């Protein structure tokens, strides 16, 4: 029997580094997919469409892989993880 279940997607937290506002958390395969999901939830076609209408702050938004952060914290290896790529 073959399983059709997909692996659990990581959870990403997106925030505005300028204001400190947490915009939300999304389950997605990549940081880019999380940004697209955030934009779609706000009524845009995708993150690029959102940025055309509402430019992000200088330097962009912070996108943190919470699963990678938790794993790094559990192992004590916080310096080794790239939170936006893990």
Image (cartoon, rainbow, N blue to C red):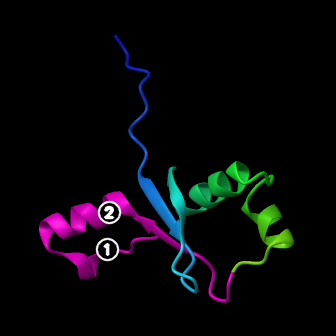
* Badge number at residue 81: 1
Magenta includes 16?
Answer: no
Query: Residue 60: x, y in percent?
Result: 63, 80
Residue 86 vs 8, above or below: the answer is: below
- For image coordinates 44% across by 21% down, the residue present is 4
Q: Are marks 1 and 2 in contact (CB under 8 Å)?
A: yes
Query: Residue 31: x, y in percent?
Result: 54, 62
Query: Residue 76: x, y in percent?
Result: 14, 74
Residue 30 is at least partly visible in this image: no
Magenta residue span: 57-86
* Badge number at residue 68: 2
Which badge, 1 or 2, comes first in the chain's sequence?
Answer: 2
Quarter occupied by the C terminus: bottom left
- Give 78 or 2, whichever is nearer the viewer: 78
Residue 57 is at least partly visible in this image: yes
Residue at the top extreme, as displayed: 1
Name the secondary structure under disc 2. helix
Residue at the left extreme, as displayed: 75
- For image coordinates 75% across by 56% down, the residue present is 46
What crowding class fits label 2: few (fewer than 14 Cα within 10 Å), some (14-19), or many (20 or more)? many
- For image coordinates 64% across by 51% down, the residue present is 37
Q: Quadrant of residue 73?
A: bottom left
Query: Residue 78: x, y in percent?
Result: 24, 77
Name the secondary structure under disc 1. loop
Q: Is residue 80 toward the left or the right of residue 19 in the image? A: left
């Amino acid at each position: 029997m073959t399983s059709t279940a997909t692996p659990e997607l990581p959870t990403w937290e997106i925030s505005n580094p300028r204001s400190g506002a947490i915009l939300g958390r999304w389950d997605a395969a990549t940081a880019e997919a999380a940004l697209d999901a955030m934009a779609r939830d706000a009524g845009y076609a995708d993150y690029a469409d959102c940025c055309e209408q509402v430019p992000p702050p200088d330097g962009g938004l912070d996108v943190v892989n919470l699963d990678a952060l938790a794993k790094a914290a559990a192992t004590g290896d916080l310096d080794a993880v790239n939170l936006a790529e893990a």
